[in-house]
Image (cartoon, rainbow, N blue to C red):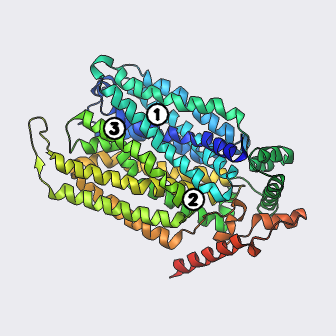
Amino acid sequence: MGKKLANWYFAIVAALCMVLYGYDASVFNSVQGSDNWFEWMNVDKDKDTQMLGLINTSYTIGAIIAGFFLGGPLADYLGRRWGMWAGCFLTIVATFMQAFTPHHKIGVFIAGRVIIGIGQGLALTAAPVYINEIAPAEIRGRIMTIWQMNYSVGSFIAYWVNYACSSRRERLGQWDWKMVVMFQILVPALVCIALPFIPETARWHIKKNGNIEAARASLARMRDTEQEVEEELLAIRSAVEYEKEAISSTSYAALFRDPSVRKRLILAFILNIGQQLTGQGTLNSYSTSIYRQIWNNPQTINLINALNATFGILFTLNAMWTSDRYGRRWLLIVGAIGMGVCMLIVSLVGLKTPTVYTEESPDGVKSEPVGIGIVFLLFLFTFFYKPSWGATVWMWTAEVFSVNIRAQAVGMSSQMQNVANTIFQQFFPEFLANEGLKCLFFFMSVNFCLAAYVWFFIPETKQVPLEEIDVLFGGVSHSGKGGDILGEKVADPSTTKDAAEVTAVHAATTEKQTV
């Protein structure tokens, strides 16, 4: 296998962990279209809206705990690979709990979702760290695009399996929703099988026990020449040595000792909270409930969800050629403005068009032409979201932290998505029931605010080497300073073209923040 192809293969194995998130975020939305599920769980879909919110967000409780307190230490102690493996294994166990929940024992179903959340918290902490640590800087954006695309792949599998099962509901009975849940085992099982055969990251080998030979062997499987291996190995050793000498901590305390790290943590927290408040998380979890206000045919709703997931894969691929060409900031700003405009128009259409009341729909639905227009706008919203706040937020979060605190910081930052999700999704069903499509004005406002936030506060990280990322935030070059400690000559980033660009971007960003 060629070295470039090997790079992609190793990264794609890790990126498959994102399928767990996409599938689970979609599976509950899918089963809400099954009356059999409501009967089996003894839940009234019209009256028990708060219970639906609790079930949907229960997995985030486990994810938050794992992401904040378990994922980082596990990935640092056992390695990035085994952090992913543990998360996938827990997902498999919890899937069986959900699929074979005893009749009217909804507590077992909720417990299974909590355990899946723990599994996700472990896997989604270790996997983006692994990808960023093995990917060359010049293609890091493209590889992380695959990460976000796999969220759409998870949704794609969930919705199309649900569509197939819903079309045979009478024949399948209770298995119409059980099969949708059971398919969640497929991808984590493949990942568990593949993980032992891919290399651990060189940065982990150096950080964990200073194993230079293991790190060299790992890099040799990914880099084309021996010179590339030795140069990157020296940069990693130098950065880790500086972090040990100057910072002398790899625990959570290190996150708050360095002002530049604290700044990054706050910026990443807000960015990840914003990702969930764009509206995409809500649409993915409650699109079935939203589309019920337009159509009363469950089969039509299931088909729309499946098509949306399919287009989501294609839309995400736009980040493949834009993230490393135009940069992270450009994608985030354009995406936020585009999503805000879509939400504004959807709200106006819902407010200004008549509602049709029939015997089949006593609560009222929109006419079919209006419904088609709204669906088109929500698909357009996904077009803006997937390559920007879908893919790029993960890119930026996973690449801005130095190796000594990367696992903890990425775990905590990414789980802010679930913190926001837990709070907002708990009351969204009531919000939707009371306000209808007018509730989308909220997402419009959030998206416009997020565009301004990125413009003033988020620096560009396009193609910046991980060991030099601290320069962007007012810190020092860890590899350069570490090279002095080791007595080795590491290329001074201040004399390189890339570093000049880094310094220029940092200066421009600082100027914007002070305006």
Is residue 89 in view?
A: no
Left or right of 19 on screen, residue 445: left
Say few, some or many: other residues with alpha carbon within 10 Å of mark 3 (under 14 / 14 to 19 / 20 or more): many
Label for residue 396?
2
Residue under pointer 3: 52
Left or right of 426 on screen, residue 97: right
Identify the residue shown where x is 82% and y is 47%. Answer: 216
Say few, some or many: other residues with alpha carbon within 10 Å of mark 2 (under 14 / 14 to 19 / 20 or more): many
Say few, some or many: other residues with alpha carbon within 10 Å of mark 1 (under 14 / 14 to 19 / 20 or more): many
Residue under pointer 1: 113
70 or 289: nearer the viewer: 289
In terms of sequence position, does the residue under pointer 3 or pointer 1 come before the other?
3
Is residue 313 in view?
A: yes
- Name of the residue lying farthest toward the bottom: 515
In terms of sequence position, does the residue under pointer 2 or pointer 1 come before the other?
1
In terms of sequence position, does the residue under pointer 2 or pointer 3 come before the other?
3
- CA gap, disc 2 to disc 3? 33 Å
**Residue 339 screen position, x and y as percent:** 36, 60
**Residue 417 screen position, x and y as percent:** 48, 51
**Quadrant location, the N terminus:** top right
- CA gap, disc 3 to disc 1? 13 Å
Q: Which of the two marks, 2 or 3, is nearer to us in this view?
A: 2
